[in-house]
Image (spheres, helix red, strand yellow):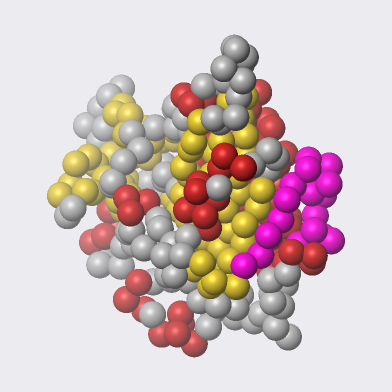
């Protein structure tokens, strides 16, 4: 059974009315993140934009995100936070925790890879890209600041023939069969709404422990690699209050390096030695 993406079906499965969510589904677009960012001045409440086909989706460091019609779920959620831009530090990790929690509740065994990848069976299932924009509609005399976060999510939902054949990129999907993407999208966004409210009030602190619980490489020896060059090697021992990955030195347990979010790849040493590591 094929489940086309429909805004009415997403709303029917969602608690969207409780937080004023607007939902739009488009058949084709370049990037849902770019579309929301271009329209940010016209937004007054949370908005979800879902695309059946996304031709210019982006991942971390400007990499392209390849998604297939009917076999993926690509959406962006615009959510306004009251506060300064700096309050969004660590948001991508909180979003990752929220997505994994919902997917596990739906029976899918999904883990996290720092900083913003979703893994299934050790392979890349999806990712998160967050962009921000100041709320220009705020009254200049109003001392309260606000910022919009545009949360882009790309997720492979079905293991199609072409994805199955794409061994080179080691891509995972939630299922080999079609799933109700409208229902899944509604549950993912409802989970995000709850967790984004928590993040606005408490920052990253309530997400640190669950992030470590879902971390695919917790307490494993890993390497941080950038452009083929090894920058760091150590034991992945969690994240700090800012969302930096903590690497414990192999020489001294007292020496811990905080890795900031950037254009790096995280690779377990054993996996890399066997030449099946993922970016």
State left or right for residue 213 relative to residue 272: right
Residue 137 makes an appearance in the image: yes
Residue 200 vertical placement versus 129 (above, below): above
Image quarter of residue 43: top right
Let me know if residue 17 is in the magenta part.
yes
Q: Position of residue 75 (x, y in %)?
A: 58, 58
- Quadrant containing the N terminus is bottom right
Q: Which residues are magenta?
A: 10-26
* Residue plotted at (19% across, 41% down): 231
Let me know if residue 42 is in the magenta part.
no
Q: Position of residue 249 (x, y in %)?
A: 26, 32
Camera-side residue of 59 and 229: 59
* Residue plotted at (38% across, 80% down): 166
Camera-side residue of 279 and 135: 135
Residue 120 makes an appearance in the image: no
Camera-side residue of 267 and 158: 158
* Residue plotted at (26% across, 66% down): 274
Q: Position of residue 52 (x, y in %)?
A: 59, 71
* Residue plotted at (79% across, 66% down): 9
């Amino acid at each position: 059974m094929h489940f086309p993406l429909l805004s009415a079906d997403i709303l029917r499965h969602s608690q969207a009315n409780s937080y004023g969510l607007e939902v739009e589904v488009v058949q084709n677009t370049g990037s849902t993140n770019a579309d929301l960012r271009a329209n940010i001045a016209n937004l007054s409440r949370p908005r979800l934009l879902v695309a059946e086909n996304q031709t210019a989706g982006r991942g971390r460091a400007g990499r392209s995100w390849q998604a297939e019609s009917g076999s993926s779920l690509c959406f962006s959620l615009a959510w306004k936070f009251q506060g300064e831009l700096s309050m969004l530090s660590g948001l991508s990790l909180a979003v990752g925790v929220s997505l994994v929690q919902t997917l596990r509740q739906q029976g899918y065994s999904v883990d996290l890879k720092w900083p913003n990848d979703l893994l299934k069976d050790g392979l890349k299932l999806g990712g998160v890209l967050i962009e921000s924009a100041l709320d220009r509609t705020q009254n200049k005399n109003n001392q309260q600041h606000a910022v919009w976060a545009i949360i882009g999510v790309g997720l492979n939902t079905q293991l199609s023939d072409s994805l199955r054949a794409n061994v080179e990129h080691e891509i995972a999907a939630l299922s080999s069969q079609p799933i109700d993407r409208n229902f899944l999208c509604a549950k993912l966004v409802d989970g995000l709404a709850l967790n984004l409210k928590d993040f606005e009030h408490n920052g990253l602190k309530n997400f640190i422990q669950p992030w470590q619980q879902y971390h695919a490489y917790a307490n494993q020896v890993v390497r941080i690699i950038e452009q083929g060059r090894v920058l760091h090697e150590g034991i992945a021992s969690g994240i700090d209050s800012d969302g930096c990955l903590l690497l414990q030195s192999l020489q001294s347990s007292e020496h811990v390096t905080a890795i900031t979010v950037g254009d790096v790849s995280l690779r377990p040493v054993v996996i890399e030695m066997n030449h099946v590591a993922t970016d």
